[in-house]
Amino acid sequence: QNEADRAVSAMQEGTREVAHGNEVIASAGEAFEHIIGAFNVVSQQIQEMSAASQEMAASADTAINSIEQTNVAANSNAKAAQSISQLAEDQMAGLEEVSASVNVLTNGINELQRAVAYFTVK
């Protein structure tokens, strides 16, 4: 009977150890479920960060293109301003020539008036 008691006790101990093992396995399963959930959250966050960085890169490209276009427009405006400045200088030189011609004509008219006055009978 002593042997039977020990055998029953050993079986009960084995049953308890199996039950405890089942509890440990169930706990490990729950831990893995939490790990998988956390991994899925991190994976989704990485995808969102990747999408955000792609949007930022696209925005940076757009900004760079806008800056380049502004630079081209500024260079074009500078060239146009230089052309306008040169035209203004040329026009001023032309006006100075016209003014000099007007002075010459005025002097000629004054001389003609004096010459005519010389022959005018009073």
Image (cartoon, grey):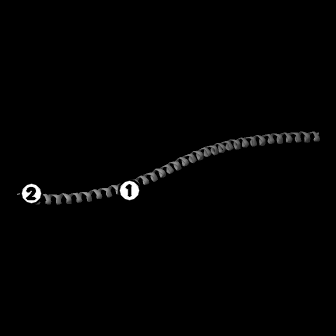
Mark nearer the N terminus (2 vs 1):
1
Number of disc labels: 2
x 17%, y 58%: residue: 112
Closest to the observer, 103 or 6: 103
Which quadrant of the figure contains the N terminus? Answer: top right
Nearer mark to the viewer, of 2 and 1: 2
Q: Position of residue 104 (x, y in %)?
A: 23, 59
* Label 1 crowd (10 A; few <14 / some 14-19 / many >=20): few
User: In the image, is residue 21 above or below residue 101?
Assistant: above
Residue denoted by label 1: 86
SS for dot 1: helix
For residue 2, the mark is none
Closest to the observer, 117 or 59: 117
x 75%, y 43%: residue: 28
Q: Is residue 85 left or right of residue 57?
A: left
Asked whether the beta carbons under mark 2 and mark 1 sit within 8 Å of each other, the answer is no
Q: Position of residue 76 (x, y in %)?
A: 45, 51
Which quadrant of the figure contains the C terminus? Answer: bottom left
Task: Look at label 1 and name its amino acid.
Answer: Gln
Task: Look at label 2 and name its amino acid.
Answer: Thr
Q: Is residue 35 left or right of residue 52?
A: right
Q: Is residue 43 left or right of residue 89?
A: right
